[in-house]
Amino acid sequence: MRGDDPRRDFAAPIAVVITRAGGAIEREIALNLSPRGLCVQMHHPLEVGEHVSVAFELPPAGPKIRGEGIVVWTGHAGQIDPETQTWETGVHLLGLSQSARDALAGFASQPINRRR
């Protein structure tokens, strides 16, 4: 993702539903997002180039975002997180409405309240 693209990491996870081309549905967690894409913790790795559908709701009760995406990077077998047993996967969002992109940009640009 580009440097001028705001991205937001989360203190609390955002649930994401990923639907694969064959119809398999994966319920996963987004680690960060931007108007162009998201990083998702996947329990089953996706292939780079794979087309998926994504659906999630911006917190606290924001709009529901639905769209298509393409996997642009993914962890490999040797890169599985030993604690969560997941792979991080980057999904580039395609064909989102302008209102969805605006909502994502607004959310991603908000300051993060991190407690120490």
Image: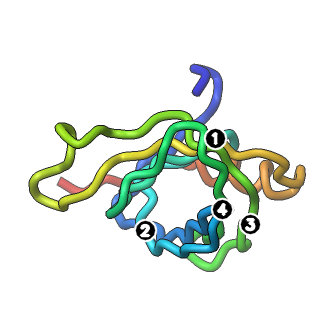
- Tell which circle, 1 or 3, labels the residue nearer the N-terminal end: 3
The kind of residue tagged 2 is: Glu
Residue assigned mark 4: 21
Real-space Cα separation, disc 1 to disc 3, in angstroms = 13 Å
- Tell which circle, 4 or 1, labels the residue nearer the N-terminal end: 4
Residue assigned mark 2: 28
Question: Whole-percent x and y of residue 91?
Answer: 57, 45
Residue assigned mark 3: 66
Residue assigned mark 1: 92
- Pointers 2 and 4 in contact (CB under 8 A)? no
Q: Residue furthest left?
A: 82
The kind of residue tagged 1 is: His
Instruction: Answer yes or no: is residue 34 visible.
Output: no
Q: Say what secondary structure mark 2 lies in.
A: strand
- Pointers 2 and 1 in contact (CB under 8 A)? no
Q: Classify 10 Å Cα crowding around label 4: few (below 14), some (14-19), many (20 and above).
A: few
Residue drawn at the location 66% of the way across and 62% of the way down:
21
- Tell which circle, 2 or 1, labels the residue nearer the N-terminal end: 2
Real-space Cα separation, disc 2 to disc 3, in angstroms = 15 Å
Q: Classify 10 Å Cα crowding around label 3: few (below 14), some (14-19), many (20 and above).
A: some
Question: Whole-percent x and y of residue 9?
Answer: 42, 48
Real-space Cα separation, disc 4 to disc 1, in angstroms = 16 Å
